[in-house]
């Protein structure tokens, strides 16, 4: 009763404050905003909410990567996924945003660094969005590209090497190719290349960078035997991975619908195409897993959801519902096929990020030329050209970054550290204290 009385008093106080404000407000204050001003406010509120949804996707990525990997590396994986958004925020604020959205050149933007320019200098002259709103939304996208790399290099990369590469990717490489497509004067956009929300701009770029990282690092110890036999290294916490998958599924309703950059009727349509692709990706991945392994594999199903989401991202605003289902279903099939393909090449990808983001990102970008309202053979060729150009540039630049880091600092932990686990060797911590009769310590190596 005392608690209820306290709440009642607080409610009365707020009611009195509101009544006083309302009575003292000038007549007609509610009518002072024009329709254009109301639209500007709603657009910014919606995109801000979408940005928050995309930022929260970092939690989903962290959960999936942690669940898919061994528990001796849990703290390391969580640390990478936590710090990557902080690094992205600062790198994108310093240079990335200006290079990606600044006007003046088809190759790279030349807007003001450190967010010191005007709306016009960042290509927002014809938009209702403010610079802070647009910056936060795009920062969330840049963080996604860097997070993808974390999964491909998991369980054997030095923490400091990952930190430095994330800064280079989000501060330099990602903004340059992003400008080609999303900059107001980007040359690929002028050519007719379409990527609505980032199947290539975000996901494939992160996938290409992660692929080079996996190649430079090499596979985890004992992952592939001399006779080519694959050693299973199953994830330790599938419940966590499944929850992470659902967080990403929900977060994608900010990723794709938010890319309208306005609160309009397209938002709901895009949300539906996005959801249908995710659902069909899950079902097709599980079906193929049943046919190949005799049982539906949960990890393949989780990546099937993500593959469908990645694939629909490029065309979610311009395909029919049935086309969205087909795009997602093909992505789900590609997940298992590409996982087997990369293992045959002995490219170790602990969480399947290459299959999800690189392979399905390419498929989704090409699907624009097949299923969207702009579909044609010419459009398909433009999409293919864009995929090749962005992929080639990202491979060269990220490969250069990895090589420099490898020569100057070293990018891989020692064999002893890897066997012990990166939690202890890199962080001096353990994600599961008290769960074992014996807990390793730094003195063990």
Image (spheres, rainbow, N blue to C red):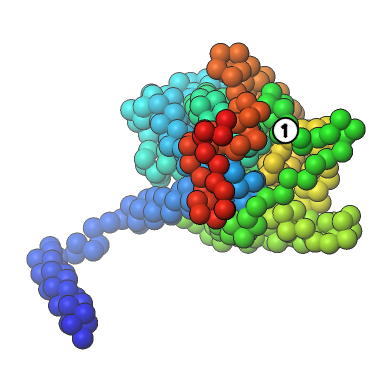
- What residue is shown at x 87% (from left), y 38% (from top)? 229
- What residue is shown at x 17% (from left), y 77% (from top)? 6
Q: Left or right of 374: which side holds 159?
A: left
- What residue is shown at x 38% (from left), y 24% (from top)? 112
Badge 1 is on which residue? Answer: 221
| Secondary structure of residue under mark 1 | loop
Residue 423 point in image, percent of width and height: 54, 39
Residue 10 point in image, percent of width and height: 17, 74
In the picture, which quadrant includes the C terminus? top right
Q: Nearer the viewer, residue 67 or 357?
A: 67
Residue 302 position (above or below residue 259):
below
Q: Left or right of 324: which side holds 83?
A: left
Residue 70 point in image, percent of width and height: 64, 46
Q: Nearer the viewer, residue 63 or 198?
A: 63
Q: Residues within 10 Å of mark 1 (few under 14, many from 20)?
A: few
In which quadrant of the rendered view does residue 8 lie?
bottom left
In which quadrant of the rendered view does residue 193 lie?
top right
Q: Nearer the viewer, residue 123 or 344?
A: 344
In which quadrant of the rendered view does residue 198 lie?
top right
Q: Nearer the viewer, residue 296 or 73?
A: 73
Residue 387 position (above or below residue 357):
above
Q: How many marks?
A: 1
Q: Is any part of residue 422 visible from this angle?
A: yes
Residue 383 point in image, percent of width and height: 73, 35
Q: Is any part of residue 254 visible from this angle?
A: no
- What residue is shown at x 28% (from left), y 56% (from top)? 33
Q: Left or right of 276: which side holds 134?
A: left
Residue 338 position (above or below residue 327):
above
In the picture, which quadrant includes the N terminus? bottom left
Q: Left or right of 308: which side holds 343?
A: right
């Amino acid at each position: 009763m005392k608690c209820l009385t306290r709440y009642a008093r607080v409610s009365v106080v707020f009611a009195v404050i509101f009544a006083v404000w309302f009575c003292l407000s000038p007549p007609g204050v509610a009518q002072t905003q024009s329709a254009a001003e109301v639209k500007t406010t709603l657009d910014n509120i919606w995109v801000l909410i979408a940005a928050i949804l995309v930022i929260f996707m970092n939690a989903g990525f962290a959960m999936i990567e942690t669940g898919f990997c061994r528990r001796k590396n849990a703290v390391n994986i969580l640390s990478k996924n936590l710090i990557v958004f902080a690094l992205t925020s600062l790198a994108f604020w310093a240079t990335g945003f200006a290079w990606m959205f600044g006007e003046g050149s088809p190759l790279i933007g030349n807007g003001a660094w450190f967010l010191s320019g005007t709306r016009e200098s960042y290509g927002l002259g014809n938009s209702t969005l403010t610079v802070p709103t647009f910056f936060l939304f795009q920062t969330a996208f840049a963080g996604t590209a860097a997070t993808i790399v974390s999964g491909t290099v998991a369980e054997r990369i030095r923490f400091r090497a990952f930190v430095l590469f994330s800064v280079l990717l989000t501060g330099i490489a990602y903004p340059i190719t992003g400008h080609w497509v999303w900059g107001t004067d980007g040359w690929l956009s002028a050519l007719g290349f379409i990527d609505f929300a980032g199947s290539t701009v975000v996901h494939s770029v992160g996938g290409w960078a992660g692929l080079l990282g996996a190649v430079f690092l090499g596979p985890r110890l004992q992952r592939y035997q001399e006779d080519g036999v694959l050693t299973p290294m199953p994830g330790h916490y599938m419940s966590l991975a499944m929850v992470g998958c659902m967080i990403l599924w929900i977060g994608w309703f900010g990723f794709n619908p938010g890319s309208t950059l306005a609160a309009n009727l397209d938002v709901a349509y895009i949300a539906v195409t996005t959801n249908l692709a995710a659902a069909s990706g899950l079902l097709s991945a599980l079906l193929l897993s049943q046919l190949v392994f005799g049982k539906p594999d949960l990890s393949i199903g989780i990546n099937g959801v993500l593959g469908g989401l990645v694939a629909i991202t490029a065309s979610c605003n311009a395909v029919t519902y049935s086309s969205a289902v087909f795009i997602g279903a093909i992505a789900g099939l590609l997940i298992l096929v590409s996982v087997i393909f990369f293992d045959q090449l002995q490219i170790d990808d602990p969480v399947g990020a290459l299959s999800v983001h690189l392979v399905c990102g390419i498929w989704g970008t090409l699907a624009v030329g097949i299923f969207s309202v702009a579909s044609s053979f010419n459009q398909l060729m433009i999409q293919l050209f864009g995929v090749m150009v962005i992929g080639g540039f990202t491979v060269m630049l990220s490969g250069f970054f990895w090589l420099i880091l490898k020569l100057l600092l070293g990018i891989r932990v020692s064999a002893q550290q890897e066997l012990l686990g990166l939690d202890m060797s890199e962080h001096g911590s353990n994600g599961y204290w008290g769960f074992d009769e014996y807990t390793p310590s730094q003195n063990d190596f």
